[in-house]
Image (spheres, rainbow, N blue to C red):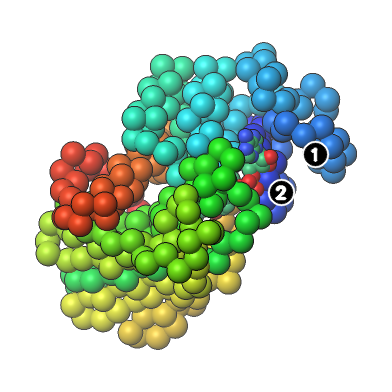
Amino acid sequence: RKLGVALVGLGLYSEGQLAPALEKTKSCRLAGVVTGTPDKAQKWKEKYNIPDKNVYNYQTFDQIADNPDIDIVYVVLPNSMHAEYTIRAAKAGKHVICEKPMALTSADCQKMIDACKQANKKLSIGYRLHFEPHNQEMMRLGQQEVMGKVNKIIAQNAQKQENDTPWRLGGGVGGGGPLRDVGIYCLQGAIYTKGQVPIAVTAKLHPVTDPEKFSKVEEGVDFQLQFADGSVADCKTSYNDKYNQLRAEAAKGWFELSPAYQYDGLKGETSQGKMDIENVPQQARQMDAFANCILTDTPTTVPGEMGMRDVQLIEAIFQAAKTGTKVSTKDVLQVLDPT
Ligand code: NAD
């Protein structure tokens, strides 16, 4: 049996990526949707052949508890709504995939983890790059120190943000900004390449060049992750620029992806030559991996604890930027990213 997935929030990512990816999965199927917009409900029902009884809105959402067609609830809402819908899905007795960033605060992340534990349901975060072969190669080269100790990582991710999703610029339900949205990939990339969680962070906000656009969220931020062995990751993110890179400099060579974090078209190179790696449907792999965890009752490699660790680090980065000081992360869960 294929596990039934219900997408909650039919915005850009659900429509452009997740629904098409679900058609490429082996162990999942798009079984239901949750949307507040009746027009969208109609369109999705027709396009994906979804029965009426599997279509919910935000008021009827909790009734999903009574629907055996739905095994997994995939929360694809604005960041500020992740906590509420993950907790409601767990209470409805469903396994949950929650998009990144897991939530706005680590306190909320803890509540989400607790709710899933209490319901005895699995929780994973939409960290698709853990299932992407170029990024998996960065993990292998870095964590196994194939070119010796990794001394320095450069992780940069920026995109020009227009006002097509207002919450990303702090409008409406808010909870956006480049660090939470795209900078999180630098954080992830640095940690899974190094295979360690940083012990301290420093950070500096970029100067605001467009005060009207960036009145509610940061325009960009530079941050440095410091690891216990003296190595560092220099990271940079912005909503007003364009770059996309993950590079590691090791004792005996370097390895790099550029672009590194996209859905497709990733390219890799090392000091020994180009990486010969195919691009694959990342999200299909990600969802199949989670389905497999459910079917075999094994832990996910991208659990809520990892999402919470990253939110704790984001909190530390904002604190470092605000105070201009180095912030220790000794209280952050010391969870290693698995390969
Ligand atoms: P979006 O704004 O296009 O979609 C959000 C959806 O939530 C919309 O359909 C909107 O109608 C709905 N919604 C319900 N209640 C709402 C409310 N009160 N205010 C605003 N919208 C409301 O955003 P998106 O780009 O699809 O991103 C959704 C989530 O997916 C975010 O958490 C984002 O970080 C994540 N995402 C992840 C990736 C990835 O590669 N893993 C890529 C894109 C987005």
Q: How far apart are marks 1 and 2 (CA)?
A: 10 Å
Q: Residue 201 location, x and y as percent?
A: 21, 55
Q: Specify few, some or many for label 1: CA neighbours under 10 Å numbering under 14, 14-19, or 20 or more.
A: some
Q: Say which residue appears at 42% left-offset and 72% top-offset.
A: 245
Q: Say which residue appears at 79% left-offset and 21% top-offset.
A: 53
Q: Say which residue appears at 35% left-offset and 73% top-offset.
A: 247
Q: What is the three-letter code of the residue carrying label 1?
A: Lys
Which residue is tagged 2?
15
Q: Residue 100 location, x and y as percent?
A: 48, 45
Q: What element carries label 1?
A: helix
Q: Residue 286 location, x and y as percent?
A: 53, 48
Rendered view: 277 above or below 26 = below
Rendered view: 140 above or below 47 = below
Q: Residue 40 carries which label?
A: 1
202 and 49: which is toward the camera: 202
Q: In terms of image quadrants, where is residue 235? A: bottom left
Q: Residue 218 location, x and y as percent?
A: 42, 56
Image-based side of 213 in relation to 41, left or right: left
Q: In terms of image quadrants, where is residue 251? A: bottom left
Q: Specify few, some or many for label 2: CA neighbours under 10 Å numbering under 14, 14-19, or 20 or more.
A: some
Q: Residue 244 carries which label?
A: none
Q: Say which residue appears at 26% left-offset and 76% top-offset.
A: 249
Closer mark to the observer between disc 1 and disc 2:
1
Q: Is the distance from the Cβ of mark 2 to the nearest ligand 1 atom less than 8 Å? A: yes
Q: Which of marks 1 and 2 is nearer the N terminus?
A: 2
Q: Is the distance from the Cβ of mark 1 to the nearest ligand 1 atom less than 8 Å? A: yes
